Amino acid sequence: MSSTEIYEERVREAQRIIAEIAVPHTTSAALNYDFIAASQSPSFGQRWGEEPAAVACRDRYAKSAMALFQETTALTRQLQSLQVTLGKILQNLQEADMTGEESAQMINDGMGAAESPDQRPKPPRDHPSSGPKVPGPR
């Protein structure tokens, strides 16, 4: 078995894992986060109470769930883009002798096109990745 055949086999396996495992899991997680965020509305149920602290906690919980929904949705798009790029690499490997370095560059180029940093959803102000904490009203 040549190195190109081994590489093709690895690319096919990566595509299979993305299609059969990764994308379904991230899609399911995104839908769960969306449901969790939507189910925190006052009309869905009064499980949080109406006190200011309870309402603030509910709102923060819903915002966090929505941020997770946005992140997992973005991850799903990136995985789908990677799967398409891997398909192009496989096609190029079969049509011509593409080197490992050329295919790695193609992956980097494809992932960059999938989502630039400016397109990423912004986390809520109180999300850990949003920077230093700013004290809120008490």
Image: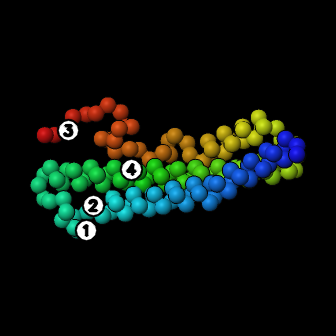
Q: Position of residue 80 (x, y in %)?
A: 61, 54
Which residue carries the number 2 mark? 40
Q: In this view, does 46 lie to the left or right of 89?
A: left
What residue appears at the point 39 percent right and 50 percent down from the top-left corner?
A: 67
Amino acid type at mark 4: Ala
Q: Mark 4 or mark 2: which comes first in sequence?
A: 2
Q: Which element carries disc 4, helix, strand or loop?
A: helix
Amino acid type at mark 2: Gln
Q: Position of residue 14 (x, y in %)?
A: 68, 50
Q: How far apart are marks 3 and 1 (CA)?
A: 27 Å
Which residue carries the number 1 mark? 44
Q: Position of residue 60 (x, y in %)?
A: 27, 49
| Disc 3 + disc 1, Cβ < 8 Å | no
The answer to whether 28 is drawn above or below residue 1 in the figure is: below
Q: In this view, does 9 lie to the left or right of 77?
A: right
Q: Which element carries disc 2, helix, strand or loop?
A: loop
Please, which residue is most extreme toward the left here?
51
Amino acid type at mark 1: Phe
Q: How crowded is mark 1: few (under 14 residues within 10 Å), some or many (20 or more)?
A: few
Q: Residues within 10 Å of mark 2 (few under 14, many from 20)?
A: many
Q: Please state, as top left, top right, bottom left or bottom right, where the N terminus lies in the image.
A: top right
Numbered badge on residue 136: 3
Q: Distance between the residues labelled 1 and 2?
A: 7 Å
Q: Distance between the residues labelled 2 and 3?
A: 21 Å
Q: Mark 4 or mark 1: which comes first in sequence?
A: 1
Please, which residue is most extreme toward the front here?
1
Numbered badge on residue 67: 4
